[in-house]
Amino acid sequence: MPRAKKLPIPPSTDRTELMKRWGITVDDDLLELALMHRSYANEAGGIPNNERLEFLGDSVLSIVIADRLFHDHPQVTESDLSRMRAATVSQEPLAIAARRIDLGQYIYLGKGESLYGGRDKDSILSDTYEAMIGATYLTHGLEPTRQVILTNLEFLLKNAVVRGEHQDFKTQLVEYAQAAGLGEVRYEVTGTGPDHHRVFTARAFVAEYAEAVGSGTASSKKHAENAAAQDAMTRFDSASSV
């Protein structure tokens, strides 16, 4: 894949160690694409980036983790399974998994992202991790990819019950709103700042109230929405305890 001149080169370009940590080799062209963040691709003149692989990897990851949780926890309800899955495949845990294999050192980033800490940004690490899963799936198919996912995320799956109880505030807010008859939950999200330093602010609404019931700020839309849901749940808990 062609590279533009004067763009940052990843600290690590020999991917042998990455493949060892990942647990399986991936087709060279697909691996290159999986590591190609849109910031680099845009600055390189619009070459392909890893977003399509990320889309595919996200779907593969979701079904693999859902299947594992379904069989490992036969007595757990659907809502709890949903929380456990979210606590395993959402941005923060995937970023942790990416750091365990030092993935950030291999990602092609544009100048701004390289300068402002993009190699350790949760959103970039988690998206690239999903792209790696997509590349692995296209190289080997579902079953080998399943083994890679389960091996690399075993440390999260062991704590899925506890993580699910504390991390998925969006699901908690929906369930609370339904139980209390507050109506549908929705979010309004705005973003400010350049692409390499974007900040998102989310406000959570329920149909019963005209004003926002919670707000939150984060470096991604998903995290901002979850923070807004957490703020809403904190407010509702405080009101119910008065």
Image (cartoon, grey):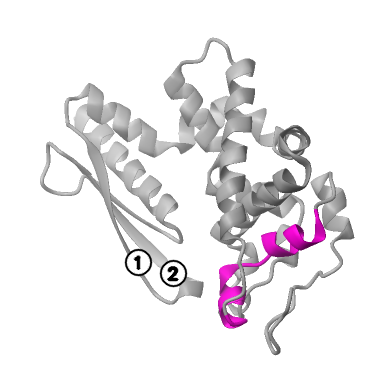
Q: Residue at x 46, y 23 (%)?
A: 80
Estimate the spatial distance between the alpha carbons at disc 2 and disc 1, rounded to whole Å.
7 Å
Residue at the bottom extreme of this rendering: 6
Residue 36 is left or right of residue 233, and the answer is right
Residue neighbourhood size for the residue with mark 2, other residues' Cα within 10 Å, grouped as few (<14), some (14–19), many (≥20):
few
Q: Is residue 113 visible?
A: no
Question: Is 32 within the magenta?
Answer: yes
Residue 93 percent coordinates (x, y): 59, 44
Q: Residue furthest top?
A: 75
Q: Nearer the viewer, residue 233 or 195?
A: 195
Q: Quadrant of residue 179?
A: top left
Front residue of 92 and 129? 129
Mark number for residue 191?
A: 1
**Residue drawn at the location 37% of the way across and 62% of the way down:** 200
Quarter of image, res 106 = bottom right
Q: Quadrant of residue 226?
A: top left
Residue tagged by mark 2? 198
- For residue 137, above or below residue 224: above
Q: Are marks 2 and 1 in contact (CB under 8 Å)?
A: yes
Residue type at tag 2: Arg
Q: Please say if 118 is above or below 78.
A: below
Q: Amino acid at mark 1?
A: Gly
* Image quadrant occupied by the N terminus: bottom right
In this rendered view, identify the residue nearer to me: 212 or 56: 56
Task: Tell me the magenta residue range.
Answer: 27-45
The residue lying at 77 percent from left, 52 percent from top is 101
Q: Secondary structure at mark 2?
A: loop
Tell me which secondary structure the magenta stretch mostly adopts: helix
Tell me which numbered mark, 2 or 1, is placed earlier along the sequence: 1
Q: Which mark is residue 217?
A: none
Magenta stretch: includes residue 119: no
